Image (cartoon, coloured by chain):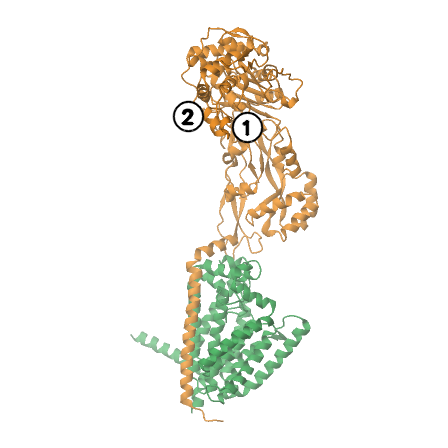
Amino acid sequence: MITDDTRESAAKRTFSATARLLSALKLDGPLLVGLGLLAVYALIVQFSASGQSVDTILRTLMRIGLGTLAMIALAHSSPNFLRSLAPWLYGAGIAMLLVVDAVGIVGKGAQRWLDLGLVRFQPSEIMKLAVPMLAASFMHERRLPPDWRSLLMLAAIVLIPSALVAMQPDLGTAVLIFATGGLVVLMAGLQWQVIAGLCFAGIGAAAVGWNFLHDYQRQRIRIFLDPQSDPLGSGYHIIQSQIAIGSGGLFGKGWMNGSQAQLDFLPERSTDFIFAVIGEEFGLLGLIVLLLLYLFIVSRAVFLATQASGTFARLLGSSLALTFFVYVFINAGMVSGLVPVVGVPLPLISYGGTSVVTLLAGFGILMGLYSHRKLVNS
Amino acid sequence: MRIKDQWNEQRIFSSRTFAALLIIGLLSCALVVKLVYLQIIRHDYYLELSQGNRVRQDPIPASRGLILDRRGRVLVDNEPAFQLELIREQVPDLNDTLQRLAGIGLINREDIDPLRRIIHSRRSFDSVPIRLRLTDEEIGRFAVHRHEFQGVDLRPRQTRHYPYGELAVHALGYVAALSVDDLDRIDKPGYAGTTLIGKLGVESSYETQLHGLNGYQQILVNAQGRSVKFQGAYQPDLKAEAPVAGKDLVLALDLPTQRAAEEALGEHRGAIVAIDPSDGDVLALVSHPGFDPSLFSRGLTRSEYAALTNNEDKPLLNRALRGAYPSGSTIKPMMALAGLTYHIVDPERREFCNGSFHLPGSSHLYREGKGGKHGAVNLVDAVARSCDVYFYNLASQLGVDRIAAFAGQFGIGSLTGIDISGEKPGLLPTPEWKKQAFKRPQDQVWFPGETVNFGVGQGYLLVTPLQLAHMAATLAERGRSFQPHLVMGVRDASGRIVRNAPTPAPGATGISDDAWALVLKGMIGATTYGTAAAISKDARYTIAGKTGTAQVFSVAQNAKYNAKTVAERLRDHAWFIAFAPAEAPRIAVCVLVENGGFGASAAAPIARRVLDAYLLDGPATGPPALTPPGNPP
C-alpha cells in the first residue's frame, strides 16, 4: 500500500511537472499527444512508402523539429500581436506570390518555389496562415454577422491570394487558402441565405471558370468523373490508388508488404497518395485509427478555439482547426475517389513540403490563442 | 468602432461551431462509407486486380505429342525453331510496329489486318506469335533492327516437323497458327503460350490428347513490367505448375504400306484406303494430290493459300473421306449376297448375256458396260466377269427397297465413324429420298429403270473410297464389321502403350455361309480368271477382289463410248476393292483412280502393290510392341 501510494504520488508529481512545463511553454497537452501520435504514425508509414529509406525518416524528423520550434514560438505570441502582424504577413505574402507568378510566366512553366539561396520555400504556405489572420482581424473590428460591405472586403482578402496561387498553377493549395478564409467568413455568421446564394453564384462562376482552367486541371476533373476513361493516362493514379485501398481489405496486407505500393503501381506513394499505402498495408482498421486520430485533433482544436476570447481569436482558431479537417477530407477523398484529384497532401503524414511546418505553426497559433484567453478576459 | 454585442457574437459562434462539427461528422461518415465499399464490399475485386498487377503468369507450353505408325516409327515430331512474338501492352503503336515489320520483310503486308485481329483477341499481356519459323537470314535481319521494335522479340519454340513431307497428309492433318475462330472455341488460358493447333486429320481430331496441358510460372513484376524478386520487405510465394506433355499417338497406319500405296498411285488423282478387317485398323489412307503440311506450320502467305484452294486438282480435298463417286460394279458382290439371301437367284442357274437388257414393256436398252457379250453365266461367273446384264436382271427382281436395306448393312449411305472428322456419307438412293430431293413432282417418282442402274452401281448412288474399303472389310469378315480408326492407341509419358479396343459396327447379318462362300468364290474368280485376272500373277497369296468403273457422265443411247476421245477429265473413274489372303483376310483395300478408265487396268495393279507391301514385307502378326488393355507386358 505504501509503495502504491508513493507510486501514485510519483505519477502525480510527474504529471503536474509536465503540466507546469506545458503551461510555461503555452502548449496544450491533449492536442500535443494527438499530434505526437500522428507523427509516430507518419514515420512508420513513410518508412514503408519510401522503400525503407532511413534518409526519409531523418528529413521528416528534421521538419517536425522545425515545425515544433515554430509552434512553440507562435504559441507565445498574443492575439494582439498576431492581429498587428496580420496585414504585414499578408502583404509580404502577396508580394512574394507576385514574384513567383512573374518568374513562372517568364520561365513558361509551373512555379511554386521561391529560392532564397539557402532555403527554398513556397510563399503560398504563408498565405494559409496570413489569409485567416487578416480576415479574422478585419472582422474583429466589425459587427457579426458581416454586412455586405464587409463581405466584399473579405472576398478580396480571400480571393486575391487564392487566384494568384491557382495561377501558379497549384489548385490544391489555392483550394486550401480559399477554405481557410472562407471558414472565417462562415464562422463569422454569414447568413445561410447568402451562403446558398453564393453557392449558386459559385456554380455559375465554375462554368465560366472552366474556360480558364489549365488543360491538366480540366483533365483531372474529367478523369474524376470517369477514371476508366483513361486507365493508362490521367486515370491511372486514381484507379491504382483504389486498387491499393480496396485490396487492403479489413486488416491490410501488412507493413511493407503492399504490392501496389512496393512495386511502384501506386504513383506518388509517399506524398499525395500515402493514404492509399495505409489503406493497403493496414487495411480499413488502419484508416479508421488514422481518421479517429484526426477527428480527435480537430475536435480538440475546435474546443480550444471556442474557449479562446475575442472575435479575432475565435475566428482564427476555428478556421485553423476546421482547415485541418478540410485537408484530411480532400486528400482522403481524392485518393479514395470521393472528390477530384487536387494536389493536397495528407496533413502531417505525407512526406515533404513546407506543409508540416505551416501546419504545426498553425497549431502553435491555436494553442497561443487558447493560453492567452484569461489575459484578454481580464 | 461600433459597440459589439458580445452575447450575440457568442451565440452565432456557438451555433456555427455546432454546424461545423455536424458537417465534419457527415463528411467523415461519407468517407468511411466509401472506404467500407472499397475495402469490404469490393475487396475481392480489387484484390484480384492488385494480384493481376503484380503477378504475371509466364506460360510454359506443353510439348505436343508425337504421332507414330503402328510399329512405333515416327511420322510427326517436333523441332525447335525461332518465331517472332509480340506483346500488345508493351508495343507503343501496334499499327506502326506491324507496318515497319512488313517494311523489313519479316511479315507480309497483306497479313497485317488478320494479325491485328488475332493480337486483339488475345489478352494484352500474352505473347502472340506473329511470324513462325524464321530462317537464319531473317533471324539476323531482325537482330539488327531489334532495338526499334519494343515489345517484339524472337522466341525459341517447338514447331511441328513432318519428316516424310506430304506422306499421309490427309490422314495426319497439319497444324497452323491459332486463328481468331480457334480462339473463340478453345480454352484461352489453357492455350496461353501455345502457337499451333491441329487443323485437319489426326492433328485436329486428337487435338486435346496431342496438346497436353500447358504449365506456368508466376513471376513478380513491378509497374514497369520488369521481373523483380522482392515486394517491399518480403519475397512472396509464387506458384508454378509444370506442363503435362501431350500424349504420343500410335496410329494403325503402316508406314511401308502407306508409302507403297502413295508410290503406286503415282501422279494419278485418287484415293486408297486399306483396312485390317479384323479390327478396323486403317493401315493406309491416301488422297492424292496432297500438300506439304509444314507450309501451314510455318505460316502460309495468302497467295500460297489461294494457290492451294484454287488448284483444280483440289489438293486440300480429302478424297478418301469426302470424295463421293458412283460405286460402279464394286457393289456386285454385295448385290449377289442380296440376291442369295432373298432367294431371288439360283446360284447354279445360268443366265444368258447377249450384251444388253431391257425391262418388260420398255424399249430402253441397258448395255453391258464394256460392250461385248458374256454368254451363259452363273452367279460366280457374273461376279468374276462383272456381267452387267446378270445384275440388271437381279436388281430389277430385288427391287429398290430391298437393295437399299441390304446395302445399308454394308455401310453404304452412312458414315463409317472413322476417328477423324470431315467424313461424307455419300448417297444411298431410295424412293423416299427422291421425293425429298427433287422439287418437280414428275422428278419425284422412282422409275424401275433407276433400280436397274442401281444394280451395277450407277445412277444416283454415291460412295466414298473409305466406305468401299469398309464394305470390302465387311465382306472379308463375312458380315462382321468394325468402325475404321486411324489411331490405335496412345503411348503415355512413361512409354507404356495402351491399345484402344476396336469398336464393332452393326455389320451384315442373316446371310448364309453358302452365300458367303459363293460370293468369295466369285471374287477370287475375278482375280484369277475374271476381270482382274492380271493382278494375281505371281501372287504368293489368294486375292478376292472386284473391279468397278464409274461413269462420269451418261453415254448417249446407241453411241459407242470411246475412252480415248473424250477429254481426260471426262474419263470413267476406276475402282478396285480387294481383300487378302482370301482364306484368312488380313487386309482389305479400296483403290480409286479418278478418270483412270477401267478398274481392272487402272486400279487393280495399284491394289496389288498395296497388298504386297503389307502382306509380304510386314510381319505375319500384329506389332508385338503394343499391349492390349488389361494385359500387362
Residue that mark 1 sits on: B322
Three-letter amino acid code of the residue under disc 2: Gly
* Tag 2 and tag 1, C-beta contact below 8 Å: no
Q: Which badge, 2 or 1, is on the more N-terminal residue? A: 1
- Which tint was used for chain A? green
Q: Can residue B192 be seen in this view?
A: yes
The chain coloured orange is B
Q: What's the chain of the residue with tag 2?
A: B
Location of the C terminus of chain A by quadrant is: bottom left
Give the Cα distance between marks 2 and 1: 36 Å
Q: Where is residue A216 in the image (x, y as percent from the top left)?
A: 59, 66
Residue appearing at x 49%, y 49% in the figure: B238
Three-letter amino acid code of the residue under disc 1: Arg
Residue that mark 2 sits on: B630
Estimate how packed mark 1 is, as few (under 14), some (14 to 19) or many (20 or more) residues with alpha carbons within 10 Å.
Answer: some
Q: Which of B612 and B313 is in front in this view?
A: B313
Tell which tag, 2 or 1, sits nearer the viewer.
Answer: 1
Q: Where is residue B176 in the image (x, y as percent from the top left)?
A: 58, 37
Q: Is residue A67 visible?
A: no
The quadrant where residue B107 appears: top right
